Image (cartoon, rainbow, N blue to C red):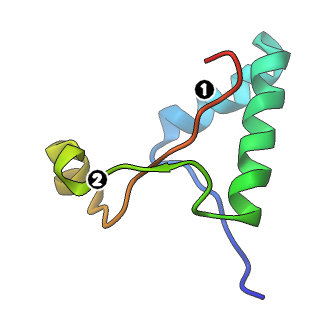
Amino acid sequence: MTDIFVGFIDEKTKKEYESAKKESPNLFKFLERATDDLKKNPESGIKIPKKFWPKEYVTKYKIDNLWKYDLPNA
């Protein structure tokens, strides 16, 4: 079985994630569940068709796939 790593696109996103632990425990719980789901199945969620990818994501982050994961109550 391959190890799966869930990372952050940038430091700002990582800091926001970490601050949710204190500032919004319910949101943090949902984010943790999403992370666990993605580790179990990286294709969790909805695949976004290539024609809808933001050009900035393709250029800046060199993406070659894009998925959307809906959080509860979001």
Q: Nearer the viewer, mark 1 or mark 2?
A: 2
Residue nearest the viewer, comparing 34 with 14: 34
Q: Which mark is residue 53?
A: none
Residue 27: name its quadrant: top right
Mark 2 lies on a secondary structure that is loop
For the residues bearing labels 1 and 2, Cβ distance under 8 angstroms: no
Sequence-first disc among 1 and 2: 1
How many dots with numbers?
A: 2
Which residue, given by chain and number where applicable, does mark 1 sit on?
16
Q: Amino acid at mark 2?
A: Pro
Residue 15: name its quadrant: top right
Which residue, given by chain and number where applicable, does mark 2 sit on?
49
Residue 21: name its quadrant: top right
Point 39% across, 54% down: residue: 66
- Percent across and percent down for residue 72 are 71, 24
Mark 1 neighbour density, 10 Å: few (under 14) some (14–19) many (20 or more): few
Residue nearest the viewer, comparing 73 with 8: 73
Point 17% across, 50% down: residue: 51
In the rendered structure, the answer to whether residue 61 lies left or right of residue 71 reads left
- Percent across and percent down for residue 32 are 79, 40
Return the residue found at the far bottom. Answer: 1
Q: Amino acid at mark 1?
A: Glu
Point 61% across, 18% down: residue: 74
- Percent across and percent down for residue 42 are 61, 63
- Percent across and percent down for residue 3 are 73, 79
Mark 2 neighbour density, 10 Å: few (under 14) some (14–19) many (20 or more): few
Return the residue found at the far top. Answer: 23
